[in-house]
Amino acid sequence: MPGQPPRTESIPVGELLAALATGAREVFGADWEPRLAEFLAFLRRRVSGQYEVDEFGFDREVTERFLLAAVRPLAQKWFRVEVRGVENIPVEGGALVVSNHSGTLPVDGLVTALMVHDHTGRHLRPLGADLVFRMPFLSAMARKSGATLACHEDAERLLGSGELVGVWPEGFKGVGKPYSERYKLQRFGRGGFVSAAIRTGVPIVPCSVVGAEEIYPMIGNLASLARLIGVPYVPI
């Protein structure tokens, strides 16, 4: 009638919840309820401080739930990574994985850590460059993922405690080389990784990454801009 507000049909709460549940199953899969409960439990542990990190800042739960999970679709669907020789990695005890470094951006290190975890169940503890730990956000994420500074002391402590340690001795020279020098090993950095392995009595496992050079070929370097912002290179 004139002057009266229009009538609206109310939706029963039960029907609304059922519709939301159906939509959640279609978007997140049939197991969305236990996944949601698990995520809420994770949040409660974080808020209450009921979680553990080791002396280097490694957060196993964050690494497995978020960091590795974020890299996995990229490695499986985009890069379509194939792994060979993973049986050479010891199932327990300390070992040093030594790999080439290539591909302009250091994604090869992230993917290597993911492949090691998914095929062996072990976490690769990377030795990172000084620059990584001078960047506020990146430093925190690197620590949570299990990385630490590439120095003798940290390497020996990790190896001595039975950890699987990863090192890319070419450093930024490896990932920052032009496409014309693809697959040419660059000069190694400090070289202390060999002595760390010898002193702790652990095996050295060589690793080769093939294909990263073609994923993101570096055809130029904005050297002036790199010096201005304090990074080794700015790729084109």
Image: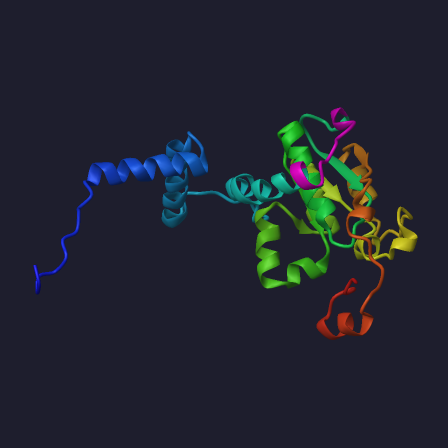
How many labels, in total?
Answer: 0
Report the span colored magenta. Answer: 76-87
Relative horizontal placement of residue 135, taking residue 31 as reference (left or right): right
Residue at x 71%, y 36% (from the top left corner): 80
Name the one closer to the observer, 162 or 23: 23
Q: Percent from the top left, x then y, of residue 56?
A: 59, 48
**Quarter where residue 15 is shown:** top left
Residue at x 39%, y 45% (from the top left corner): 43
Q: Percent from the top left, x then y, of residue 110?
A: 68, 45
Q: Percent from the top left, x then y, of residue 168?
A: 78, 47
**Quarter where residue 33 is shown:** top left
Dividing the image into 4 quarters, which one contains the N terminus? bottom left
Farthest residue toward the front? 2
Viewer can see residue 163: no
**Quarter where residue 105 is shown:** bottom right
Residue at x 68%, y 34% (from the top left corner): 116
Q: Is residue 159 above or below residue 121?
A: below
User: Does 26 lie within the magenta span?
Assistant: no
Q: Is residue 121 above or below residue 224?
A: above
Relative horizontal placement of residue 154, taking residue 6 as reference (left or right): right
Relative horizontal placement of residue 34, taking residue 156 as reference (left or right): left
User: Does 85 lie within the magenta span?
Assistant: yes
Name the one closer to the observer, 134 or 73: 73
Relative horizontal placement of residue 62, taking residue 35 as reference (left or right): right
Q: Percent from the top left, x then y, of residue 171?
A: 79, 53
Residue at x 76%, y 65% (from the top left corner): 234
Q: Is residue 120 above or below residue 148?
A: above
Q: Is residue 38 above or below residue 224?
A: above
Dividing the image into 4 quarters, which one contains the C terminus? bottom right
Viewer can see residue 188: yes
Name the one closer to the observer, 126 or 192: 126
